[in-house]
Amino acid sequence: MSTVPLRLANLVLCALLVAAALALVSSQYRARQLFAELEVAQQETRTLTTDGAQLRTDLGRAAQPATVEAVARRLGMRGIDPNRIVLLPPPAAPPAPAADQP
């Protein structure tokens, strides 16, 4: 009769050992998944940082007066000619409303 409780205890301990082993495997699998996701995110961060630096360089180059002038000429624009400037007079101010005097 003393062997029945011992066998039951062994069975319970064996079940707990299997459960702990499954939990360990599951947590290691999840850790590997998270590590892979982290690597992908870090690579994307590096790519975006490089792209951002390239865009800042391109913007600085595009803002140069010589670049703006070259693009304007390609679009058919021309420089300012003082003989072609027309100054328009400012619009006339509307008459003030007459105040009703009793």
Image (cartoon, rainbow, N blue to C red):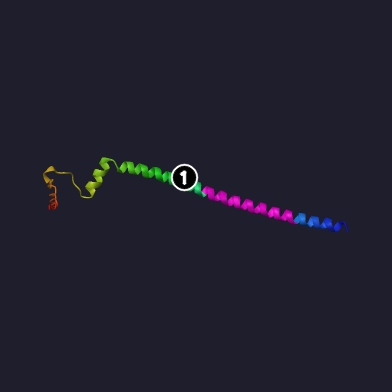
Q: Is residue 102 left or right of residue 54?
A: left
Q: Position of residue 58 (x, y in %)?
A: 34, 44
Q: As shown in the figure, which amino acid type bears the numbered disc 1? A: Arg
Region in magenta: 15-39
Q: Is residue 30 magenta?
A: yes
Q: Nearer the viewer, residue 5 or 39?
A: 5
In the depicted structure, whether residue 8 falls above or below residue 74: below
Q: Position of residue 32 (x, y in %)?
A: 59, 50
Q: Residue furthest right?
A: 1
Q: Regarding mark 1 in the picture, which secondary structure is present there?
A: helix
Q: Is residue 99 left or right of residue 31?
A: left
Q: Residue furthest front?
A: 102
Q: Quadrant of residue 61?
A: top left
Residue visible at 36% across and 43% down?
56
Residue visible at 66% across and 53% down?
25
Q: Nearer the viewer, residue 36 or 10?
A: 10
Q: Which residue is mark 1?
A: 46
Residue visible at 83% across and 57% down?
5
Q: Main secondary structure of the magenta part?
A: helix
Q: Is residue 20 magenta?
A: yes
Q: Nearer the viewer, residue 47 or 9?
A: 9
